[in-house]
Image (cartoon, rainbow, N blue to C red):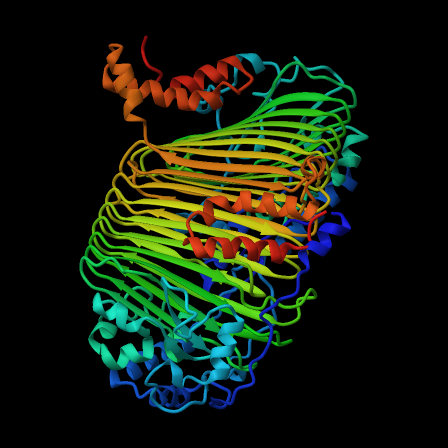
Amino acid sequence: MTIQVSPGQLAKSKATTQREVYLAALLNQRSEFDRQNLSADLGDWLQDLRDRASVRLQDLAIPSPKDEEWRFTDLSSLLQVSFQAATAALSAEALAGFNAVLPETAESCLVFVNGRYMPSLSSTAGLPQSVTVGNVGQLEEPYAARLRHYLAQQPGSEEVFTTLNTASMTDAAVIWVPKNQVVETPIQLLFISAGETATLSHPRCLVVAEPNSQVTFIEDYVTGDRGYFTNAVTEIWIEENAQVNHTRVQRDRSNAFHIGKTAVSQARHARYIGTTISMGGKVSRHNLEIFQLGEQTETTLNSLTMIAGEQLSDTHSTIAYSSPYGTSRQLHKCIVDDQAHAVFNGKVVVPQAAQLTDAGQLNRNLLISPKARVDAKPQLEIVADNVKCTHGATVGQLDADEVFYLQSRGIDADSARKLLIYAFAFEIIEQVPIASLQQALSQSISPPTS
Amino acid sequence: MTASVRTLVNQPYKYGFITDIESEAIPRGLSEDVIRLISAKKNEPEFMLEFRLRAYRHWLKMTEPTWQRATYPAIDYQNIVYYSAPKQQEKLGSLDEVDPTLLDTFEKLGIPLSEQKRLTNVAVDAIFDSVSVATTFKEKLAEEGVIFCSISEAVQKYPDLIQKYLGSVVPVGDNFYAALNSAVFSDGSFVYIPKNTRCPMELSTYFRINNGDSGQFERTLIVAEEGSSVSYLEGCTAPMFDTNQLHAAVVELVALDNAEIKYSTVQNWFAGDENGKGGIYNFVTKRGLCQGVNSKISWTQVETGSAITWKYPSCVLVGDNSVGEFYSVALTNNRQQADTGTKMVHVGKNTRSTIVSKGISAGRSENSYRGLVKIGPKADGARNYSQCDSMLIGDTAGANTFPYIQVQNNSAKVEHEASTSKIGEDQLFYFAQRGISAEDAVSMMISGFCRDVFNQLPMEFAVEADRLLSLKLEGSVG
């Protein structure tokens, strides 16, 4: 199968030299891969992978608004900041402020600080022995040998920020669920960016769900006070009849830069349920790429962007079908306050082979303040004739009639508005499979007091 | 797809004949001299020459757009004849003096120009290659103060109006093809509706390309003064050549306070043969400016022809409470490529727009809807509703939608819906068991699918469009 990458993403143009120089500077900040616990063979392969990505990066540049894929997301403000690779490990006290490990996952979590694995903060005691959850160094055979068939092997890995991540990655979080294993306990992958300077980190996750397995995991990003830059890549492989329930929560501070990618490859009968909550970051971008590679795959995507102030949050999703009988349901909601700016681009590609596809997409945007801005582009590209594809997009404000109705029931206007915003957001938040996280997210939208 | 449906779609193009008429053309190629020559041939005032040269200089600096969903070999702009006109005596006193071959040609196309046969309630401006051949009902329209004539005539007779409005909606440097058109446009129609006048009849322009080497660059300008209203229709056909011809038109509409313009198009340029050989490249810029309060501009288009269609009739809603509408049916078959849609730019308060787009793709064609709904920061209470539906016939045709929604005002309400469907075996079977043949069934389903749009067409043309579509699709379903 082929995935379209706009020429702008790969093309090198002379006018953007500043953007090339900046990208090279970001690459220069990378540190060596931690080879301590790796076999020589695997270490060499990873080194080679990084080197090849670095070479490819020489022909790339930070995208500008002239590239169609980045038309509404201007990265100029990123170019103003010079980031440094995080070096010094942080003390336990410094990390105490990020008490983001969930009670449900106290014994099934991996914590990464500035891209480095923190064994002292992580625990996998609550998980079955047969499941591998850890960093690359903890991988045992035969998984270590099979890593090269999965890591950085998805289509779309050529994209500039993914390439930068591959070239700069120092470690990766790995979840490997063997055949027929159903993991009941949810797993949390917590990525913390902290430290005294504006640092740059490249978190990487690899999830492999072997045939007939099931797993639920949460990918959670938090940052400290400085304007950190997180460039994350998560690769998920769902093999035949396996199921992955994935929640991605990005709650960086509003001065951080966050560029993240989630790429999902689904084999025959595989099911993926993705819930994404993006509320942090000064400039944030989430690229969500679904590759349905076999028949009768099911994809459910629920996402919520909630921003205020001068935040910019961009979600680009692609669902690429390739086989018959695939289904997808996507609901993307944005709540935009103050002068914030939300961008949504949702692409659905149905080639001739993907007959009997059933794809539904809905994008709803709620503008709270007069200066809020939304740019949406739902996009359908269809060649197969026996398919059912729909998409819808709406932009609007809170319905005055609804506010009035609540007021007539004795609820003051302010609470009424809050209640309606809460209800709008809760449709997505209630999809989060973990009660404590659901509660924490609900509280952050200031639920109405009863 | 069954064989019966396949044969149903592949109906020959019946307007593909060539009229053998002596024509006067200038040599191929484009330069400042050519533009001066065109301007001199048309005996234009100085300001028009300047307008053209300004556009030409802009054009030289521009690059051809490549973002559209269409592939075609590079166009050699120096290999096109930019002016071609049927030879005839100087001034025409009446229609009787028009070359009878020309009249026959239009007769064959179903556009009778002669006094006794003409449609009683439609005034027609017939344009053959680059020039206007005849305009009917001029006197009757003049009684109401309505000006309906070729744009060359308007340049001579009403230079003030032309100078004021030409290029006011689509500036000379707007885009590559608009700049090219502004530099070399040869003819087109001009309509002026005075204050508080309801145009007494439908106005219509019929475009015909005849010369195999010429490009057609026509320009249409419609100005509706305060409180006036007009309904305008354009139709187009071309002979079958196995080379590609360029058609780059510009249409500008201006609606002042409380004015209403309805612009309908039935486009049936030659689409090339089933292997994609020949056909017209249709690169058109159409834009309407709702300048006044409560003004309304409505575009209706039925696009069935052209090898490539690149066309986005737009409305710029500046006046408060102004309304923009876009109703479109785009049908592609064989190797046709259509990238069409609209732009609704909301600037004023309480502006409203509606978009209904129906795409039907058959054969190996590619049909894209590309639209923009933009709500500016001052467009309080703006409202948009968009609906784009695609119907695929056969599994080798492509349907794409690229709707851009840009909202910068929280009191706006924007809704967009799209769906894709097909004519299924079970639907055909249902019709068959009621004794309705596959062809009739398809034609019924298509007209049902397109009804929202056809309802917007003037009555005479709705019937025409319905028939045109079923003819085009004959043999494609099954």
Residue at the image position 56 percent from the left and 55 percent from the top = B467
- Left of B342 or right of it: where is B171? left
- Left of B375 or right of it: where is B478? right
Residue at the image position 24 percent from the left and 10 percent from the top = A410
- Left of A362 or right of it: where is A81? left
Instruction: Please determine whether, in this image, residue B224 is positioned above or below residue A256.
Output: below
Quarter holding residue A247: top right
Q: How many marks?
A: 0
Q: Can you give x and y, in whole percent of width and height, for residue B442 in the image?
A: 64, 46
Residue at the image position 44 percent from the left and 20 percent from the top = A426
Quarter holding residue A397: top left
Q: Can you give x and y, in whole percent of width and height, for residue B278 in the image?
A: 63, 72
Q: Nearer the viewer, residue B328 or A129?
A: B328
Residue at the image position 65 percent from the left and 53 percent from the top = B362
Q: Nearer the viewer, residue A28 or B212?
A: B212
Residue farthest to the right, as pictured: A142
The answer to whether residue A91 is seen in the rendering is yes
Q: Can you give x and y, in whole percent of width and height, for residue A156 in the image?
A: 63, 47
Instruction: Please determine whether, in this image, residue B40 is positioned above or below residue B132.
Output: below
Residue farthest to the top, as pictured: A450
Instruction: Please determine whether, in this image, residue A98 is positioned above or below residue A286.
Output: above
Q: Nearer the viewer, residue A139 or B364?
A: B364
Q: Can you give x and y, in whole percent of width and height, for residue A234 in the image?
A: 61, 35
The answer to whether residue A23 is seen in the rendering is no
Query: In which quadrant will I find the C terminus of chain A?
Result: top left
